[in-house]
Image (spheres, helix red, strand yellow):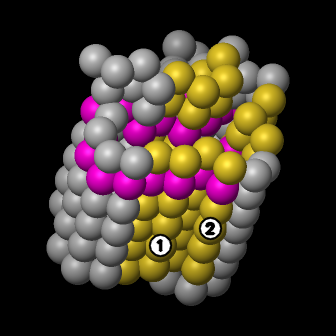
Amino acid sequence: VRGGVVRPHAGARVSPFRSEGAWALDGVAVRNASTVGVSAARSSGNFTVAESTVSRAGDSHGIDATNATGAWAVTDTTVVGSGANDNATGAGVFARGTEGAWRVAGSRVRANEGPGVLAAQSTGNFTVEGTTVRANNGTGVVAVGSEGDWTVRGGEVVSNSGGVDATPV
């Protein structure tokens, strides 16, 4: 998908949920989704979200890659205001249980109701670089119980309820 805006419409979102193969979002704005902004949960293959904005995913996460496999990247993208509905705790980028190499680079992850970037119980290598993770109600970057090499470099992880949590299980 290249260019355009996804606006609220019966849970409007971009959802390659359980998809196989490569896909990309480039220059897309996803706004005011009632649930997840971009759901790649349980997908396999490579995916990219580039030069996009995901704002105000109501009940859940901005970008959800739960249990996804393959290499993926979020680059030069803004994820803001996830979990905005009452009692929601949405992360900006939620990657629990993923397998494969992935990265968040040159992006802005801010003002989400949960963690900024969560990669708990994931395997493979991941990198958060040149990214600002700011003012999230959860920890900035969470890698609890993850295996593989992970790196946080450049950018800022500031004004969250915690900085970086990589507690082993």
Q: Is residue 65 above or below residue 138?
A: below
What amino acid is at disc 2? Thr
Nearer to us in this view, 67 or 90: 67
Instruction: Residue 101: tell me if it is visible.
Output: yes
Q: Which residues are magenta?
A: 107-129
Instruction: Give the class, few, some or many, for how many residues have Cα within 10 Å of label 1's Cα (few <14, many ≥20).
Output: some
The residue at which mark 2 appears reads as 75
Q: Where is residue 37 drawn, in percent x and y?
A: 50, 51
Is disc 2 placed on a helix, strand or loop? strand
Q: Residue at x 66, y 17 (%)?
A: 162
Q: Main secondary structure of the magenta part?
A: loop
The residue at which mark 1 appears reads as 48
Image quarter (top left, top right, bottom left or bottom right) of the C terminus: top left
Q: Residue at x 45, y 78 (%)?
A: 24
Earlier in the chain: of badge 1 and badge 2, it is 1
Q: Residue at x 80, y 29 (%)?
A: 158
